[in-house]
Image (tube, rainbow, N blue to C red):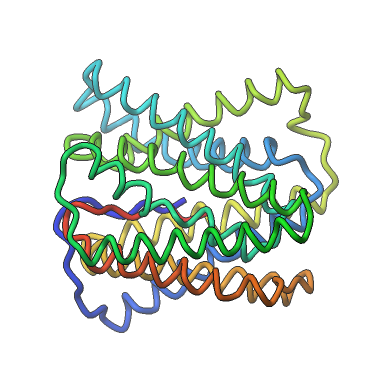
Amino acid sequence: MAEGGVGQWQLSRPTVSEFGLLTIAVLGVSMSAPLTALAAAPALGIAFWRNAVGAALLVPGATAQLRRQPLSRRQLALCLLSGGFLAAHFAAWLPSVTLTTVAASTALVCTTPIWTTLAARIAGHRVPGQVWIGLALGLLGVVLVTGVDVTVSTRALTGDLLALLGGILAAGYVLLGASVREQVSTAAYAAVCYSTAAVLLAAAALVTGTSLGGYAARDWLLILGITVCAQMLGHTIFNRVVSTVGPTVVGLAILLEVPGAALLAFVLIGQVPALLVVPGLVLIVGGIAVVIRSGGDRVQTGPST
């Protein structure tokens, strides 16, 4: 998942090359949910391998940085806690992809900015009036989507609620990460965070009797595709361009994952969301866009899937 940056929220015009990179990143993260829906491998297994591979790629560079600048006890504790939230996020969201539609699951998990904004308000930060409008629109969209799925099936509603929980848990991951990365490099933070998530997911798989291997060749290819597209291309590129185009542009670009994932789900698995769900999806995306655009430096984007 790609994190939105921390700091001032400016809306700058991307260059042609930056626009190209953002397009690749959006396509990358949009592949996550459809490929997960195609996989027969268990959700915990997919989540474990995503984080384990991501950690393995980051550890060499992060180790050198940590030798030069070791983490304090507080920084290490926050990194570990953030990894815990990330593991819980994946454990909640990935199963939702197979229970409800890809479009609904992606839209609901992308509500993270709503929860980070509410957390900021609870912490005493002032929230601009326009942001409250965006929050209201987003929450109305959530109610519409889940309300429609109540009439569809208990399975679909369960998927919606898990995706929503995944978005809430991602808020904890984002807020902790924002605090840590004020003093710790992204590589060092992500390496510790991903490693922690992988260990916790492996432990959860052990407790629940979930296999982390022995999958069919097709599932290994899908896991590889998810890791390359969402973890390496999506995350890496968003983190690269956020310092030049700004968190607002990245946050708005991440929202394109919702229609992108829905379109790819239609192409790859022939999945079409219920017609009555569409207005809810539009309200969620529109509301979150208002929150991101109007929130100033108090609002932070969530990770993309």
Q: Position of residue 16 (x, y in %)?
A: 31, 84
Task: Name the residue located 50 percent from the left edge and 74 percent from the top edge.
Answer: 282
Vertically, is 208 above or below 5?
above
Q: How many marks?
A: 0
**Residue for point 26% across, 62% down:** 131
Apparent side of residue 70 relative to residue 140 in the rendered image (left or right):
left
Horizontal and vertical percent for residue 76?
30, 22
Residue 246: which quarter of the image?
A: bottom left
Q: Position of residue 36 (x, y in %)?
A: 69, 54
Residue 18 image position (x, y, % from top left): 31, 75
Relative placement, left or right, of 77 versus 59 is left
Relative to 194, 182 lies left or right: left
Front position in the image: 239 or 60: 239
In the displayed structure image, the side of residue 179 where residue 24 appears, left or right: right
Question: Is residue 36 placed above or below 190 in the rendered structure?
Answer: below
Name the residue at the bottom extreme.
Answer: 16
Q: Residue at x 57, y 56 (%)?
A: 228
Q: Quadrant of residue 285?
A: bottom left
Query: Which residue is rendered at x = 25% and y = 34% of the image?
Result: 180
Q: Is residue 228 above or below residue 11?
A: above
